C-alpha cells in the first residue's frame, strides 16, 4: 500500500528505513545477503498507524467516570482523580501502550499532565512524541505551575532513546493563563518543539469563552473562585499565529475560527469516540475540507474511550458522518492516521516509500484487495500479523 494506492508484485528492502521498493528478483541482486521474509497470499503491507493524541496517565478508568455530558464528566474526573492516578501504576500504563501496539499503532503522541507516564513512554516499543502539558488559569500560582512544567519538560528531554522526542501541550483556552501560554511558546519557538492544545471541545467551553457564562460558570466560581474567563477563543488563537499547532476536538468552532485555523496552517485532531461519550457534537469535517485544513484522527485517552484502537476510531467516524461520501471518507480516515498524522507531527513515517522509517504493518486480508479496500480495512478489522517499528519486528514472527 503505497500512500493512497495499492501496488502488487513488489518487495521492500529495509533496515531502520525503507531502502528500496522493487520486484523481488531485483532486490535480491542488490541485497544478496539480506534476510528474506515471505508473506502469506493476500497479505497487505501498509504504514504503521499514528495516534497523535492519547492520555496514558488516566488509563485506569473503566467505570469510574460519568459519560454523556462534558461538565458531568469533568466533575467525575475531579472526584475520582486521586483514585485514578493511584490506580494507574507502571503496569497499567504499559498495558495501554501494549494495547496500541496490538492495534498497529507504531507512533503515538502522549499528552502528559504529571510526568507519571514518562518511564512507560520512554520504554515503549513505539516512537513517542511526549507532550508535556501546561495548565493553570490563576495568575497567583502561575510561577509555581510554570516551574513544574519546566521541570517535567527538562526530564523528558533527558530521554535519549531512538524514536522518543519531547513537545508541549497547552491544555485549553479556559484553563491556561495567557502569561503561561506566552512563556511556553517562547520555549516552543526557541527549541522548535511540536505543539498541541485542546480547543472548543464542548458547548460549555464555547459559552464560557464567549461570555463567561453557561455550565462552566458554576464550575469556575465554586472550585477556583473565578468569575471571568482568562481569554476568549480569538485571543487564544492569537497566541498561535506563528506556530502551527495540533488543535484537538474543535467541535464548537465557528466560521471565523475555521478561517483562522486555515490561514495559520493548524491541524485539527478528530476524536469521534471521545466526543460522543462527552456529549460533544461531531467535528465539521466538511468545513475543514472546504478550507483545506488538515485533520487527523486520534483516540484520546481511556478516560473518554473504551480502547486505544485507531481502526475502531475510524469505524466510528465512518458512521458518524453520513453526509460525506463513504469511500472518500474511508480513504481520508486512513490517511489521517498515516501520512497526514506523520506530517502534522513532523515524523519521517506514514507511508511505504523509500527513505521513510520502516514503520509497517502486515495485514492478513481474506482476498485480493478491491477498489474499496479503505472501507474494508476499517469495517472488518483484519488480523495484524506483523508490526515493524524502525525496521524491528515488534509483533509477530
Image (spheres, rainbow, N blue to C red):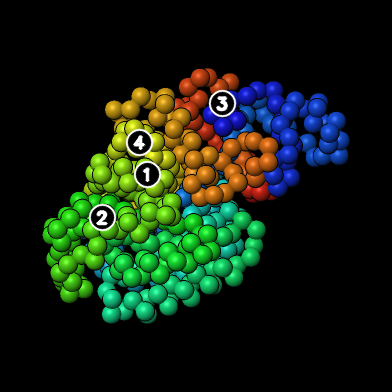
Instruction: Say few, some or many: other residues with alpha carbon within 10 Å of mark 2 (under 14 / 14 to 19 / 20 or more).
Output: some
Quadrant assignment, res 367? top right
Residue at 17% x, 67% y: name it. Answer: 228
Residue at 49% x, 36% y: name it. Answer: 335
User: Residue beneath label 3, please?
Assistant: 5
Q: Disc 1, disc 3: CB below 8 Å?
A: no
Instruction: Find residue 93 and report its horizontal and vertical position in percent.
Output: 48, 61
User: Residue beneath label 1, please?
Assistant: 263
Query: Mark 3 or 4 closer to N-term?
Result: 3
Give the CA separation, mark 4 to mark 1.
Answer: 9 Å
User: Residue beneath label 2, please?
Assistant: 233
Q: Locate the C terminus and report the quarter of the image it occupies.
A: top right
Instruction: Find residue 351 and report its horizontal and vertical position in percent.
Output: 59, 37
User: Residue beneath label 4, please?
Assistant: 291
Q: Secondary structure at mark 1?
A: helix
Q: Locate the N terminus and report the quarter of the image it occupies.
A: top right
Amino acid at each position: 500500500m503505497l500512500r493512497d494506492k495499492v501496488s502488487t508484485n513488489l518487495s521492500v528492502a529495509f533496515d531502520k528505513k525503507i531502502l528500496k521498493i522493487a520486484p523481488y528478483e531485483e532486490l535480491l541482486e542488490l541485497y544478496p545477503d539480506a534476510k528474506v521474509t515471505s508473506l502469506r497470499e493476500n497479505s497487505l503491507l501498509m504504514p504503521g498507524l499514528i495516534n497523535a493524541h492519547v492520555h496514558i496517565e488516566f488509563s485506569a478508568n473503566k467505570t469510574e467516570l460519568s459519560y454523556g455530558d462534558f461538565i458531568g464528566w469533568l466533575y467525575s474526573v475531579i472526584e475520582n482523580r486521586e483514585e485514578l492516578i493511584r490506580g494507574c501504576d507502571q503496569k497499567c500504563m504499559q498495558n495501554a501502550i501494549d494495547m496500541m501496539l496490538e492495534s498497529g499503532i507504531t507512533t503515538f503522541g502522549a499528552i502528559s499532565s504529571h510526568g507519571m507516564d514518562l518511564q512507560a513512554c520512554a520504554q515503549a516499543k513505539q516512537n513517542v512524541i511526549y507532550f508535556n502539558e501546561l495548565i493553570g488559569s490563576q495568575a497567583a500560582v502561575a510561577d509555581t505551575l510554570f516551574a513544574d512544567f519546566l521541570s517535567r519538560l527538562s526530564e523528558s528531554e533527558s530521554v535519549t532513546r531512538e524514536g522518543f522526542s519531547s513537545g508541549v501541550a497547552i491544555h485549553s483556552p479556559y484553563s491556561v493563563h495567557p502569561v503561561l501560554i506566552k512563556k511556553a511558546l517562547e520555549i516552543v519557538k526557541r527549541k522548535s518543539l511540536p505543539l498541541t492544545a485542546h480547543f472548543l471541545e464542548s458547548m460549555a467551553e464555547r459559552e464560557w469563552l464567549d461570555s463567561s457564562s453557561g455550565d462552566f460558570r458554576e464550575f469556575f466560581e465554586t472550585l477556583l473562585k473565578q468569575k471571568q474567563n482568562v481569554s476568549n477563543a480569538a485571543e487564544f488563537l492569537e497566541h498561535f499565529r506563528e506556530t502551527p499547532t495540533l488543535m484537538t476536538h474543535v467541535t464548537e468552532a465557528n466560521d471565523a475560527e475555521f478561517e483562522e485555523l486555515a490561514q495559520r496552517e493548524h491541524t485539527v485532531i478528530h476524536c469521534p469516540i471521545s466526543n460522543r461519550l462527552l456529549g460533544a457534537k461531531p467535528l465539521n469535517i466538511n468545513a475543514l475540507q472546504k478550507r483545506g485544513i488538515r485533520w487527523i484522527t486520534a483516540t484520546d485517552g481511556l478516560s473518554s474511550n473504551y480502547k486505544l484502537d485507531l481502526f475502531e476510531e475510524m469505524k466510528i467516524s465512518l458512521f458518524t458522518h453520513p453526509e460525506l461520501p463513504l469511500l472518500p471518507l474511508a480513504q481520508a480516515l486512513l490517511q489521517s492516521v498515516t501520512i497526514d498524522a506523520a506530517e502534522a507531527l513532523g515524523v519521517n513515517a506514514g507511508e511505504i516509500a523509500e527513505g521513510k522509517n520502516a514503520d509497517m504493518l502486515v495485514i492478513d486480508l481474506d482476498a485480493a484487495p478491491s477498489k474499496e479496500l479503505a472501507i474494508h480495512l476499517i469495517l472488518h478489522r483484519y488480523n495484524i500479523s506483523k508490526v515493524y517499528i524502525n525496521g524491528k519486528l515488534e509483533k509477530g514472527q
